[in-house]
Amino acid sequence: MPTTDNSQQTIQNTYAIIVAGGTGTRMQSNVPKQFLLLNGKPVMMHTIEAFHNSSYKPQIIVVLHASFHEYWAELCTEHHFTTPHTLVNGGETRFHSVKNGLDMIEDTDALVAVQDAVRPLTATATIDDAYSHALAHGNAIVAVKSRDSIRQLRDCISQHLHRDEIYLVQTPQTFQFSLLKRAYEQPFDNTFTDDASVVERSGVKINLIEGSHSNIKITFPEDIAIAEVIQKKPLSTKQL
């Protein structure tokens, strides 16, 4: 897996599309997981701040279901959250939500990172590396090698897969805007699981860069407790 240097490059506009479409079903909660408190602050605020702190200083677009816009505004007031961002209506699926975010961008030379709202622990260095690599190579998908043995189940038969060839994909997934915009002009397909799968379908080679096992996605109730522990660790121990 290639790595990138962390040197800042002079570039055109950068954007971050924060996708917040969760409804809280798997969290066993009436509150969508992006609004749950992580060390006293809603998860999504941590995510937004991570991108705001990037040396690339992206313009931040938050894609959120319209029914939650008022609630989000109340949370921002309650937590004195003033980090600049633009709120956009979410779509029927993640695919459509990302499209809505892309429609807000007019600069065809921009770089765009797409991020799960519920990945609040993404390191600033990871975000910067993704922008840098996408600038040089068209796209950068953050991923980590599997730590576990892997088996594939097909037609009731399980087969061992080589762990060293298996990567677990995370976000951010960062692209040159024109490439990403063109890929999202394709018709929606249920097999699209993330932005990389959409772009790959358009015929573009996908580039992986090193992520971190600390860059967890808040999906289940226990993930909040795990994230709180990771966030409180010294900076030098977070990149697991």
Image (cartoon, grey):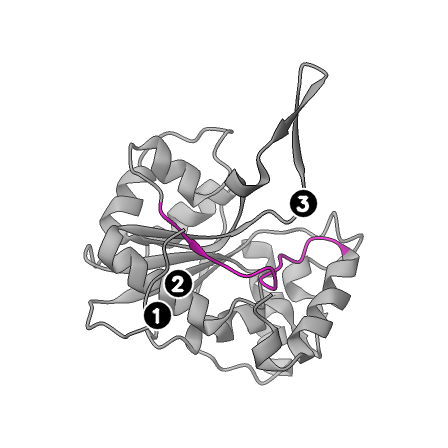
In terms of sequence position, does the residue under pointer 3 or pointer 2 come before the other?
A: 2
Query: Are circles 2 and 1 on residues that touch, CB within 8 Å?
Result: yes
User: Which residue appears farthest toward the top when viewing the image?
Assistant: 155
User: Residue sitting at 80 percent across and 52 percent down?
Assistant: 28
Residue pointed to by mark 1? 58
Quadrant containing the C terminus is bottom right
Q: Which residues are magenta?
A: 207-220
Main SS category, magenta section: loop
User: Considering depth in this image, is 76 or 202 the residue closer to the camera?
Assistant: 202
Is disc 2 placed on a helix, strand or loop? strand
In terms of sequence position, does the residue under pointer 1 or pointer 3 come before the other?
A: 1
Q: CA distance from mark 3 to mark 2?
A: 31 Å
> Mark 3: which amino acid?
Asp
User: Residue sitting at 43 percent across and 76 percent down?
Assistant: 52
In terms of sequence position, does the residue under pointer 2 or pointer 1 come before the other?
A: 2
The circle drawn on residue 16 is: 2
Q: Quadrant of residue 79?
A: bottom right
Query: Are circles 1 and 3 on residues that touch, CB within 8 Å?
Result: no
> Mark 1: which amino acid?
Pro
Residue pointed to by mark 3? 148
Q: How many marks?
A: 3
User: Which residue appears farthest toward the bottom when viewing the image?
Assistant: 80
User: Considering depth in this image, is 156 or 88 the residue closer to the camera?
Assistant: 156
